Image (cartoon, rainbow, N blue to C red):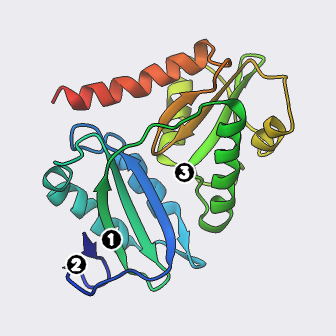
Amino acid sequence: MQDEKNDTPSFAGFELGTPALVCRWRLANRTLPLENRHLRALAARSVSGAPVSTQLVAWAKQHIEWTLADGSAPHPNGVLMLVMDTEGRAAMSVGPYDFLASASAADLAARAVAAAHEARVTGVAPEALWAVRAGSLVCGADPDWRPSGIDSLVTDLAKTLGVPVCHDPLLAANVLDGEKNLDELFLASDEHGILPAAGLAGSHARRLADGYAKLLEAANRR
C-alpha cells in the first residue's frame, strides 16, 4: 500500500482521510485482466468535483505493474481496491473475493441503484444493470456517464456479437418497481463480473458471462 501524494510506502501512523473514491477490481492469477479498461475508467472519474489527476492514474498503473504480483500472493484471485481520500491521497490493497449471496433481479437492481448514486458524484458507475428487450441490449446507466471497465467490455462484446445497445437510466428503478417486460437481466460489475439474474439468464447474458469467464481463465493459464 502506498501514499500516492507523497509516492512513498505506507508506514505506521499513515492513515487515509474520508474516502472520496473507492474502486474494487477483480483479479485473476495475481493479474488484473481488465487493467487498461479500469485505468481508462479511473481517468474518467471525478473526485471532490475535480477530475482524477493523470499522476494518480500513472501511480496506479505503476503500482499494478511493479507490485501487484507479489502483493496479491495471499489472494491471487481476489480484489484489488483503490481508495482515494478528500485530500488527494490514495492507497491500494488486495483482499479476498466474496461471491454475492444473492443474484435475484431485485438484489442486482438495488446494487445498480447504489452505483448510480456514486456515478452522479464521480461520473462512472462501477456496477450497472443490463437487460435484453426485443433482441437489443439495454444498459441501465445514464448515457452521459463514462463506462466502467466492465461496461466497456460488455459494449465491445455486444458489437462483436452484432447486438445493438441502447440506454435506459430508469432500468434498475423500474425493475425494483416490478417491471416484467424483460427477456434477460444481468449485472455488470467491476468486482463481480457479469452476473445473470436468477430466472432471467438468457442466451445473450450467458454468452457475455462466458466471454468474461474466458478472460479470467486465460489469466489463470499463464
Q: Is residue 196 above or below residue 10?
A: above
Residue 60, image x, y percentages: 30, 64
Callout 2 secondary element: loop
Relative placement, left or right, of 99 versus 71 is right
Relative placement, left or right, of 203 versus 156 is right
What residue is drawn where x is 31% and y is 53%? 95
Callout 1 secondary element: strand
Among numbered discs 2 and 1, the one appearing first in the sequence: 2
Among numbered discs 3 and 1, the one appearing first in the sequence: 1
Residue with the mark numbered 2: 10
How much space separates mark 3 and mark 1, taking CA atoms?
A: 18 Å
Among numbered discs 3 and 2, the one appearing first in the sequence: 2
How much space separates mark 2 and mark 1, taking CA atoms?
A: 8 Å
Residue with the mark numbered 3: 126
**Is the residue marked by circle 3 packed among few (<14), some (14-19), or many (20+) residues within 10 Å?**
many
Residue 109, image x, y percentages: 70, 40
Of residues 17 and 8, the one drawn nearer to the viewer in this rendering:
17
Q: Quadrant of the C terminus?
A: top left
Residue with the mark numbered 1: 91
How much space separates mark 3 and mark 2, taking CA atoms?
A: 26 Å
Of residues 171 and 139, the one drawn nearer to the viewer in this rendering:
171
Q: Is residue 101 above or below residue 214?
A: below
What residue is drawn where x is 66% and y is 30%? 104
Q: Amino acid at mark 2?
A: Ser
Q: Are marks 2 and 1 in contact (CB under 8 Å)?
A: yes
Q: Amino acid at mark 1?
A: Ala
Q: Amino acid at mark 3?
A: Pro
Residue 178, image x, y percentages: 86, 32
**Is the residue marked by circle 1 packed among few (<14), some (14-19), or many (20+) residues within 10 Å?**
many
> Which one is in front in this view, the residue at disc 3 or the one at disc 2?
2
Callout 3 secondary element: loop
What residue is drawn where x is 16% and y is 59%? 67
